[in-house]
Amino acid sequence: MTTKKKQSAAGLTKQQEKYVGLLVEGLTQRQAYLKAFPHSKKWKEKSVDENASKLFALTKVQTRFLELQKIVHDSIQTETIASKQEVLEFFTRLMRREEKEQVVSSLSRKEVWTDDNGERREVSTRDPVIVDIDTKNSDAFKGAEALAKHYGVLNEADRGDNEDYVVVEVVNDIE
C-alpha cells in the first residue's frame, strides 16, 4: 500500500507550496526550508542548504515562485502606484481648483473680565486650527499645463508657429 501525497494546483506538495510562499515573503532558502520541513531542524546546515537548493532548482518550484512573486508585485503596484487615469483626474481637479489645501492657522481668543477687586483682567490664547483653502492660481496653472502637455494642446500647429510673423524692433532714438 502506497501513500499518495496531496498536491496543489501547481503540482506541489503542501510543504513545497509552503516553502515557495515563505521564499516570496522574503525568507532565505534555508529559513524557508526549515519552516516548511520542520524535521530538517535536526540536520546539519549544509544538508539543509543542499536540500533547499535542490528543491528550488525544480522547474515546478521555480514556476510557482515566479507566479506568486508576480501576484505580489502586481498587487503592490495596484495599491501604491497611481494609474494614468487617476493622474489625469487629479490634474483636472487641480486645474478647476476643486482640490483643497490644508494649512495651519491660529485662532486667537481674548477673554476680558473684572475681578472681585474691580481690576480689569484679560487672558489671550492662540490655538492651532487646520483650515481648508482653495488651491493657488499657480497650482491650477500647473495642472492645466500638465494636461495641455499630455494632450498635445501646446504643439506648434496649435500655437500658430507655422504662420509668417513680422518682427518689429523698437529703438529709442531720442537723444
Image (cartoon, rainbow, N blue to C red):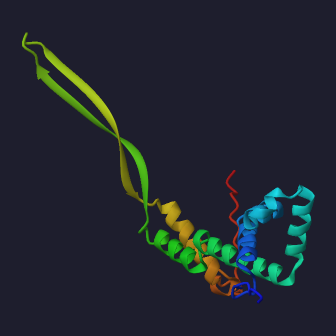
Q: Which quadrant would the N terminus be assigned to in this image?
A: bottom right
Picture residue at 42% right of the left edge, 53% below the top: 102
Give percent across and percent down for residue 149: 64, 77
Q: Quadrant of residue 153?
A: bottom right
Examine the rendered structure and indicate whether residue 48 appears above or below residue 68: above
Q: State how many labels appear.
A: 0
What is the residue that sits farthest to the top in this orientation? 117
Q: Is residue 160 visible?
A: yes
Picture residue at 12% right of the left edge, 23% below the top: 113
Residue in front for this viewpoint, 161 or 129? 129
Q: Is residue 153 visible?
A: no
Residue in front for this viewpoint, 38 or 80? 38
Left/right placement of residue 171 relative to residue 51 reads left
Left/right placement of residue 102 relative to residue 113 reads right
Picture residue at 87% right of the left edge, 62% below the top: 48
Picture residue at 72% right of the left edge, 67% below the top: 22
Residue in front for this viewpoint, 28 or 67? 28
Give percent across and percent down for residue 53: 89, 69
Residue in front for this viewpoint, 40 or 87? 40
Left/right placement of residue 63 relative to residue 124 reads right
Give percent across and percent down for residue 154: 64, 80
Give percent across and percent down for residue 118: 7, 12
